[in-house]
Image: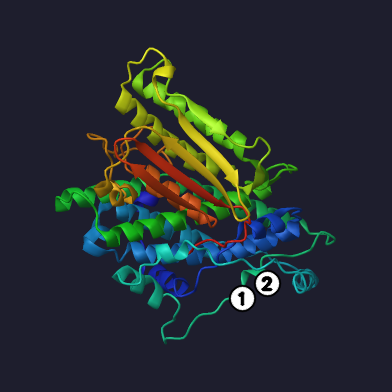
């Protein structure tokens, strides 16, 4: 269906209209407080928020996908992704709103008047995603907050519209039906966009082949950072809403957010998964040992899937570096120097340090490691029909592990830093904002 989808002139007009509104970032803290005891009324408010917010975010991306530099917008895979986003946008704005009797509309409005979510704080990563000098920033920012006559389009702050204490209201079956239908539509949209990362990567490969280019430029790198960060945010909002509507309540979970995420357990699982992939890839009986030094009861609110993804990708890199340096025909794991994972808790951050003796990275290559499509592996390419939602299966080779992991860390106000000692090894620091008050960085 989406392969034959075309953006009509009328739809383009609506896309440009919605792209004129600013996006609204939410914080982990706000999402937890909102979803702790969801009634059909609060879920209805969430549906109404997403029916406003998601079209704005999708419109920003469609507009940008249509105006990329260096003819990147003309690549077949990029056009395919643009049509996915436009189709999802059309489905959202065409979804019929719920019809409520007058008294219920008044009660829903009254229950929201004096109860606000706490304000979020600016995400420190936003500055890194906004390159004020390159043309894409001017394209997506100088024009995105204005309508056709140059006036700023304002929106009510999230704190005043994404909450409703409505548990005492007896909601009619139409509200339950609306929430269920809206959730099913979001699930279908999420499935449609599963292969977005790989399809955009394919589009960049198509461009590199057409231009005979070895690496991508800084402007394209900046766009990929913004595009993938936006994708993380869209999928988080959809995943959270679907979980609140479909999953059974759990004392430690609010949707997909674990209010008591155990860092030790998440990292330990990532270690086991990364070692398994390493042993499978190199046909080894035992891969290099990994030592975890972490308080066993260190907990904080976070999305376990995000932290697991970051640690898994970084540990894969360390394991590969150690095996490549010391050989994969070792008879015993003790012949490898151990990879150490050290976790500490500060007042603001929880920091995870992954240190290896895999030989390090030359200083001249340090800037390149954050570049998409840069990899030290050779001979790898993406199959045209590859449908995985992320690069999880291969040991290495697509050049997406580090830059995507940094975006996941930055999404809730953390960061990812790397320090290398060529000839010895590499230290990677994952900083996680334990205060949970940073809003999403929405470039």
Residue 299 location (% of width, % of height): 66, 43
Furthest toward the top, the residue is 331
Q: Residue at x 29, y 71 (%)?
A: 135
The label shown at residue 14 is none
Furthest toward the left, the residue is 212
User: In front: 361, or 120?
Assistant: 361
> SS class of the residue under badge 2?
helix
Measure the C-alpha gap from mark 2 to mark 1. 7 Å
Q: Residue at x 32, y 43 (%)?
A: 399
User: In front: 419, or 399?
Assistant: 419
The label shown at residue 160 is 2
- Whether residue 321 is visible to the viewer of this picture, yes or no, is yes
Q: Which residue is mark 1?
A: 156
The answer to whether residue 226 is above or below residue 10 is: above
**Residue 249 placement: quadrant:** top right
In-image side of 7 versus 243 (left or right): left
**Residue 50 placement: quadrant:** bottom right
Q: Residue at x 52, y 33 (%)?
A: 270
**Residue 33 placement: quadrant:** bottom right
Circles 2 and 1: CB atoms closer than 8 Å: yes
User: In front: 193, or 350?
Assistant: 350
> SS class of the residue under badge 1?
loop
The answer to whether residue 429 is above or below residue 9 is: above
- Whether residue 94 is visible to the viewer of this picture, yes or no, is no
Q: Tally the numbered discs.
A: 2
Residue 219 location (% of width, % of height): 28, 62
């Amino acid at each position: 269906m989406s392969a034959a989808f075309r953006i009509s002139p009328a739809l383009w007009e609506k896309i440009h209209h919605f792209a004129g509104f600013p996006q609204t970032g939410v914080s982990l803290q706000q999402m937890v407080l909102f979803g702790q005891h969801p009634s059909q009324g609060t879920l209805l408010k969430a549906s109404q928020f997403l029916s406003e917010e998601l079209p704005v975010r999708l419109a920003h991306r469609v507009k940008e996908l249509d105006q990329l530099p260096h003819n990147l917008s003309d690549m077949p895979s990029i056009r395919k992704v643009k049509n996915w986003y436009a189709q999802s946008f059309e489905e959202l704005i065409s979804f019929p709103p719920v019809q409520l009797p007058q008294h219920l509309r008044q009660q829903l409005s009254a229950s929201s008047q004096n109860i606000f979510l706490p304000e979020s704080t600016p995400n420190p990563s936003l500055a890194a995603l906004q390159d004020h000098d390159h043309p894409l920033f001017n394209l997506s920012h100088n024009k995105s907050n204005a309508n056709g006559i140059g006036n700023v389009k304002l929106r009510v702050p999230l704190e005043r519209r994404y909450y409703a204490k409505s548990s005492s209201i007896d909601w009619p079956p139409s509200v339950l039906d609306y929430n269920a239908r809206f959730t099913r539509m979001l699930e279908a949209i999420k499935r449609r966009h599963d292969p977005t990362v790989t399809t955009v990567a394919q589009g960049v490969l198509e461009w590199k082949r057409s231009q005979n280019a070895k690496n991508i430029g800084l402007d394209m790198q900046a766009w990929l950072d913004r595009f993938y960060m936006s994708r993380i945010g869209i999928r988080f909002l959809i995943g959270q809403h679907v979980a609140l509507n479909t999953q059974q309540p759990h004392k430690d979970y609010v949707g997909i957010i674990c209010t008591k995420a155990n860092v030790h357990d998440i990292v330990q699982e990532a270690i086991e998964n990364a070692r398994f992939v390493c042993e499978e890839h190199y046909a080894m009986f035992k891969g290099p040992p990994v030592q975890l030094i972490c308080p066993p009861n260190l907990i904080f609110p976070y999305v376990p899937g995000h932290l697991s993804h970051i640690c898994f990708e970084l540990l894969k890199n360390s394991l590969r570096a150690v095996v490549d340096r010391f050989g994969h025909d070792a008879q015993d794991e003790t012949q490898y120097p151990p990879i150490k994972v050290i976790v500490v808790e500060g007042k603001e951050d929880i920091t995870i340090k992954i240190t290896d003796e895999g030989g390090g990275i030359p200083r001249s290559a340090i800037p390149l490691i954050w570049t998409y499509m840069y990899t030290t592996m050779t001979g790898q390419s993406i199959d045209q029909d590859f449908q995985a939602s992320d690069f999880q299966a291969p040991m290495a080779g697509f050049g997406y592990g580090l830059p995507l992991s940094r975006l996941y860390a930055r999404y809730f106000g953390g960061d990812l830093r790397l320090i290398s000692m060529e000839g010895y090894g590499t230290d990677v620091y994952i900083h996680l904002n334990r205060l949970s008050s940073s809003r999403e960085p929405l470039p």
